């Protein structure tokens, strides 16, 4: 058996982005000994990339704003499929979470009279995004990190050990959630640098691993977004909800090819940037859907007046929710009115002075100058849709963030589903991380403390299986026999190929994990991308099955010390599982809604409004090794959403509800 380092904690948080750190701080403040594990270096999480801001109805820039208006916007953006209680909690609690960050040392941009400045963003009725230039995520993570360090210093003063109550394991990847019967008992993972295995025993585990974008070829997401938390939940027996909803951000870079997909923040449009096609036309006026017609300007003059006088004019259509703008850009390019490199033009150069562009959008200015040799103060950017965010995720209880069906498992942030319905509004993720990160940390701590000395033990057989699974790529790389692969490595396997875990390789030539990853990305991009069709998704599912068979032979050479090929081979399991969820759910939902557009079912269908699609593992034992990879790994089920509470429904006009709600819901 391979050597495994072991430690005991009350709460383990998997992920050190905004959601993970906020959860860890809360759990530790409530007295739980808390460990945080992250794949990358501490402080390098994806959250750092967030640019535009944190949505919170603080009413600093427009006093008419309130949690009720924010709730309404969020539900509209999500096309009423949101888990409404989450949307309510989020809208109510976000302002407090932003204030809290300031008390911990964050410094947001200010209004002239010294309040936290708030900017416009798509789908938000009022300026609502608290921001720090276009580097808000960096400030958020810096502040949370600082808070973690402050707590560690406090612990040092009391116990003489900085890490006695809050410890960060950086560059460690969790590959399995361990269980005792139904309950969580800890996690299994490996250190990326040494390859050493690690078991953290804990009765409560919070998944805060972010998104899944690395399964798509063109994406704004970082290398970490391989859907690990989604897969960990599935494998532990917790369902995922509404995985068909993947957000394609309308504005990613399209040129040069090496940077295709990198995000161009929505703040560019929020601050006045406009979209034009190759004929110079501001085409978004042609794409305002009926449900939004009364809220968006009909002429350029009215749209431009709105920036100065939002109370007496309607918003520019460039600020429609992201799904609408992405589809419009797609349609313009398809109609032959695209830019030279297959996007459209996004222009700020004719809209504001160069010095204002550089001050308000410093990262965008540098991004285009350095990566594309484009000066955005003098010429337009070329932009097109890029895979950006997954609305689907772990099905959780709205109040506690507890994952359904697995006591001790929690999920917060992008890995959790429900909050954003079928489409997330910009800025609503950072606030989601803080609101539900805190809630997950609190409830995980309370759950762990409630167990006292009745903590679930770690099942050694599961640890052995997890180790064998992790070593499998070495066996495959050596031609299919685990004994051959591990024989020379000794029981621990650090010096040699990988260890004699008896994983058992698959017969056949080894497959290169990088090739498999590229083929997976191409498949998802081409066949389950922004516009979907039944035949293409069926084709995608067939290709995914082939890739699963080949992924069993994903082989690597060398040893476990920092071996990126090995890491990718292990990530493939997660990406394939999550991709199958997206494709199956997308095939099932025969309507277009938010981040799910069916060319063969173009309209939103009210009878789907109250239907959630749940994905779970077809093999409930969660071993995968025993399952035939050529067969479906994912089972799909429909469930009815909980009826929206009447006092929340009363926040909308009846005429608006008629556009979304099914007949019987309206009657009720
Ligand atoms: P992350 O910040 O991604 O953290 C995930 C953590 O999990 C990381 O620490 C990672 O190392 C760890 N992890 C993953 N898998 C494992 C594993 N197997 N084992 C151990 N650790 C693991 N949203 C907004 O609201 N406003 C914005 O302005 C905004 N701008 C954006 C700009 C860009 C370019 C992008 C890509 C996104 C933007 N978003 C924005 C979205 C937002 O940034 C993300 O949704 C959010 O940061 C996700 O946070 P998280 O805490 O859920 O995950």
Image (tube, rainbow, N blue to C red):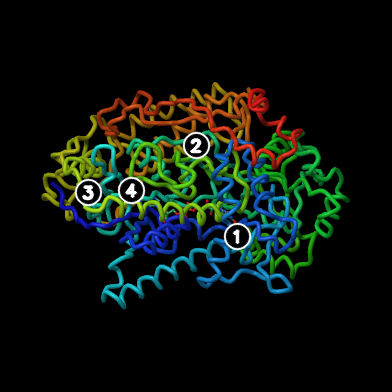
Q: Is mark 1 within 8 Å of ligand 1?
A: no
Q: Position of residue 150 (x, y in %)?
A: 40, 73
Q: Which residue is mark 3?
A: 454
Q: Which mark is residue 522?
A: 2
Q: Which residue is mark 4?
A: 565
Secondary structure found at label 4? helix
Residue at position x 27%, y 57% in the image: 9
Q: Which mark is residue 95?
A: 1
Secondary structure found at label 3? loop
Q: Is residue 569 left or right of residue 439?
A: left
Q: Is mark 2 within 8 Å of ligand 1?
A: no
- Within-10-Å neighbours for mark 1: few <14, some 14–19, many 20+: many
Distance, label 4 to label 3, CA atoms, is: 40 Å
Q: Nearer the viewer, mark 3 or mark 2?
A: 3
The C terminus, quarter of image? top right
Q: Position of residue 324 (x, y in %)?
A: 69, 39
- Within-10-Å neighbours for mark 4: few <14, some 14–19, many 20+: some
Secondary structure found at label 2? helix
Task: Please state the total of marks drawn on the protein image.
Answer: 4
Distance, label 1 to label 3, CA atoms, is: 38 Å
Identify the mark nearer the N-term, 2 or 4. 2
Distance, label 3 to label 2, CA atoms, is: 48 Å
Identify the mark nearer the N-term, 4 or 3. 3
């Amino acid at each position: 058996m391979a050597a495994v380092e072991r430690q005991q904690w009350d709460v383990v948080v998997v992920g050190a982005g905004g959601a993970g750190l906020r959860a860890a701080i809360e759990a530790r403040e409530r007295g739980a000994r808390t460990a945080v594990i992250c794949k990358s270096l501490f402080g390098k999480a994806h959250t750092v990339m967030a640019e535009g801001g944190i949505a919170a109805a603080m009413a600093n820039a427009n006093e008419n704003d309130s949690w009720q208006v924010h709730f309404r916007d969020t539900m509209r953006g999500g096309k009423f499929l949101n888990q409404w209680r989450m949307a309510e909690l989020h809208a109510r609690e976000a302002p407090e979470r932003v204030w809290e960050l300031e008390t911990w040392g964050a410094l947001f941009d200010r209004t002239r009279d010294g309040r936290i400045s708030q900017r416009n963003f798509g789908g938000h009725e009022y300026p609502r995004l608290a921001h720090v230039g276009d580097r808000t995520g960096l400030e958020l993570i810096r502040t949370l990190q600082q808070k973690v360090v402050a707590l560690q210093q406090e612990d040092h003063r009391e116990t003489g050990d900085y890490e006695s109550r809050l410890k960060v394991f950086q560059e460690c990847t969790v590959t399995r959630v361990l269980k005792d019967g139904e309950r969580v008992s800890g996690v299994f993972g490996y250190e990326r640098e040494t390859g050493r295995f690690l078991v953290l025993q804990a009765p409560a585990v919070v998944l805060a691993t972010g998104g899944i974008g690395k399964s798509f070829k063109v994406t704004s997401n970082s290398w970490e977004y391989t859907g690990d938390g989604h897969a960990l939940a599935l494998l532990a027996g917790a369902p995922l909800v509404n995985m068909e909803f993947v957000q394609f951000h309308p504005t990613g870079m399209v040129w040069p090819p090496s940077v295709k997909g990198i995000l161009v923040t929505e703040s560019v449009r929020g601050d006045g940037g406009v979209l034009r096609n190759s004929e110079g036309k501001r085409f978004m006026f042609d794409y305002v859907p009926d449900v939004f017609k009364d809220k968006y300007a009909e002429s350029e003059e009215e749209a431009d007046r709105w920036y100065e006088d939002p109370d007496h004019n309607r918003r520019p259509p460039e600020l429609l929710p992201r799904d609408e703008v992405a589809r419009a850009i797609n349609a313009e390019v398809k109609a032959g009115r695209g830019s030279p490199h297959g996007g459209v033009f996004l222009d700020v150069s004719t809209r504001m002075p160069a010095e204002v562009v550089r001050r308000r959008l410093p990262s965008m200015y540098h991004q285009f100058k350095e990566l594309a040799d484009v000066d955005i103060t003098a010429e337009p950017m070329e932009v097109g849709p890029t895979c950006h965010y997954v609305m689907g995720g772990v099905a959780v209880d709205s109040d506690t963030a507890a994952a359904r069906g697995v006591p001790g498992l929690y999920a917060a942030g992008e890995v959790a589903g429900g909050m954003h319905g079928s489409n997330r509004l910009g800025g609503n993720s950072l606030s989601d991380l803080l609101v539900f990160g805190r809630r997950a940390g609190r409830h995980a701590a309370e759950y762990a403390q409630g167990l006292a000395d009745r903590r679930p033990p770690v099942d050694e057989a599961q640890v052995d299986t997890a180790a064998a699974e992790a070593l499998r790529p070495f066996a495959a790389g050596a031609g299919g026999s685990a004994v051959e692969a591990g024989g020379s490595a000794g029981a621990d396997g650090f010096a040699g190929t990988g260890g004699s875990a008896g994983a058992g390789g698959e017969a056949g030539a080894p497959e290169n994990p990088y090739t498999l990853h590229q083929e997976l990305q191409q498949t998802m991009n081409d066949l389950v991308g922004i516009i979907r069709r039944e035949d293409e998704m069926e084709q995608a599912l067939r290709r995914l099955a082939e890739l699963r068979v080949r992924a069993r032979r994903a082989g690597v050479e060398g040893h476990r010390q920092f071996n990126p090929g090995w890491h990718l081979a292990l990530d493939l399991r997660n990406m394939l599982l999550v991709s199958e969820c997206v494709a199956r759910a997308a095939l099932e939902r025969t309507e277009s809604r938010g981040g799910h557009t069916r060319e063969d079912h173009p309209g939103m269908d009210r009878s789907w409004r109250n239907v959630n699609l749940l994905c779970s593992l077809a093999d409930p034992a969660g071993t995968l090794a025993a399952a035939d990879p050529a067969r479906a790994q994912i089972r799909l089920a429909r469930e009815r959403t909980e009826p929206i509470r009447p006092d929340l429904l009363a926040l909308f006009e009846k005429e608006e509800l008629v556009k979304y709600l099914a007949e019987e819901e309206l009657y009720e």
